[in-house]
Image (cartoon, rainbow, N blue to C red):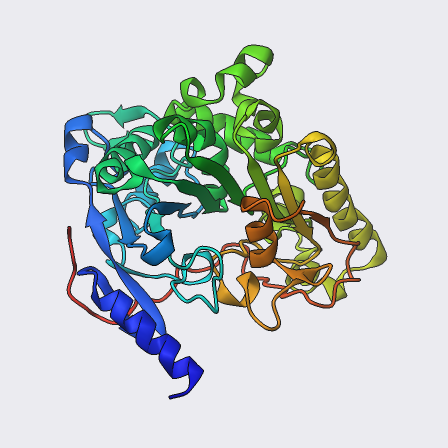
Amino acid sequence: MKKIDLLRLLVFVVCTAAPSCVYSEDRLLVGMTLVRDAAAQQAFCLDGSLPAYHLHRGFGAGKDNWLLQFEGGGWCNDVPSCLERAKTHRGSTSLMNKWEVFSGILSNNASLNPDFYNWNRVKLRYCDGASFGGDAKFENGTSLIYFRGQRIWDAIIRDLLPKGLGTARKALLSGCSAGGLATFLQCDNFRKMLPADASVKCLSDAGFFLDIRDISLKYTMRSFFEALVSLQGIEPNLNQNCTHSSAFPKLCFFPQNALKYITTPYFILNSAYDVFQFHHGLVPPSADLHGHWNRCKLDPAACDATQISIVQGLRGSMLTALYSFNRHSLSGGIFINSCFAHCQSESQDTWFADDSPRLNDKTIAEAVGDWYFSRRVTKEIDCEYPCDKTCHNLIPASPTPPPPPPPPEVPQVIS
C-alpha cells in the first residue's frame, strides 16, 4: 500500500472514531456543536441564536493538548450594519454551514500539519461582529440585537473545560483576521483558565490591524473601531493595564497598543502588505472615490511608482509598530512576509505545502512549531516587495471576498 493511502486510512480511522466528523474527498469535515448552556448566560449571537464551535478530538501523544482557532469575518459598528449582519451566517449560527473543513493549522494529517495534527482542535464560530469582545444589547421596541461576544467566549470555554480543556498540558489560542484580533483580547484570559503548569501560548494570523492614516490622511480604521467599541460595549473587556495607561482607552482595541501589556507568549503572523489593511485601512473606498487605485489593488504589478511608495509605507508602519516586540520580547515570535495576502494559517497552500511561502527556507507551519516548542528563536521579517518569489498573492476580485461555498449536504451533528 502506498504511503499516501496509509495516511488516508489513518485519517479515516481517526475521523470515524468521533461522531461529529466526516472524511470525504480528502477533506476533513467537522460537525457543529451548539453551546446549550449559553442561553442561561445570555451568550447569544447577534440574532439571538446559540453560539457554536467545531471540535475534532486529539489522539495519541496529542490527546491532552488543545488548539482553539477563532473564526474571522469583519465587524459591524452601527445598528443598521449589525441588523443586516444578523440575517447572515456572520451573525447567526442558524444560517451557518453545520460542517467546517479543517485544513492548515486545523488539519489532522501529520504530513500537512506536523506539530498540531493530533491535538484537540477547535474552531470557534464568529457571530457577534466584535471579535468576541462586546457585552451590550440594543433594543428599540421593534429590533433586538445582542452584542455578547465576551459572553460567547466565556460560554464556549466553560463548555470545553470539562471535555478536557481544563486538564490541558499544552494549549495554543489562535485566530485569523477579526479572529486574530480576538486573540489579543482573550490571550491572558485564556492563560488564567488553564492549569498553572500548562504551556499556554497565543498566535494571531492577519490580526495585527494598524492605527494608520489612509491616503486622504484620515484615520479611517480608528474611527471605525472607536464606533465599534462604543456600540458593542467592548471597553470594559479591553486590557485593563492598557486602558488605565491611555488617554484614549478605546484605542487599546488596536493590537499595537495592547501587545506590550500581554504577558502570555505571543506569535505574530502577518503579511506586511495585508490585503484587508491595504484595501480598507490604507486605501478605503471613501478615500478613492474615482477609483484611481482599483488596478493597483487587484494587481501590485499594475501600481505606479507613487502607489508602490505608499504601499511600502504600510510595511514600514507595521515594522515600526512591531519594533519593540521584535527587539525585546524573549518569548515572542514573528513571521512577517511580503505577500499580498490575508490569513495564511488556515489554508493548506500557505500553511505547509511544497510551494508554501517561506522565509529563510522555513514555512509558516515550521516557524510556528519552532516557536511554540522552543526549538529555536523564530523572528522572521521579509524583504520589501517584490523580492519574495515564494508568495501566494491572494488578492480578492473585490475588496470584501464572498463567503465560501457550502460543503456537501450531510446531517447536522450536535453534541
Work out which quarter of the rendered image holds the N terminus and state it. Answer: bottom left
Can you name the residue that lies furthest to the right here? 305
Which residue sits at x=54%, y=26%? Answer: 262
Q: Is residue 341 above or below residue 284?
A: below
> Residue 404 location, x and y as percent?
39, 63
> Residue 28 location, x and y as percent?
33, 67
**Disc count in the image?**
0
> Residue 77 location, x and y as percent?
43, 33
Does residue 160 appear to the left or right of 395 in the view shown? left
Which residue sits at x=49%, y=38%? Answer: 201
> Residue 138 location, x and y as percent?
28, 26
Res. 34 in view: yes
Q: Is residue 345 above or below residue 281?
A: below
Quarter of image, res 299: bottom right
Res. 283 in view: no
- In this view, the residue in front, 120 or 44, is 120
- In this view, the residue in front, 171 or 386, is 171
Quarter of image, res 29: bottom left
Does residue 6 appear to the left or right of 254 in the view shown? left
Q: Is residue 80 above or below residue 11?
A: above
Which residue sits at x=67%, y=45%? Answer: 377
Can you name the residue that lies furthest to the bottom here? 1
Q: Is residue 102 above or below residue 212?
A: below
- In this view, the residue in front, 358 or 410, is 358
Quarter of image, res 7: bottom left
Which residue sits at x=15%, y=65%? Answer: 411
Does residue 241 appear to the left or right of 54 in the view shown? right
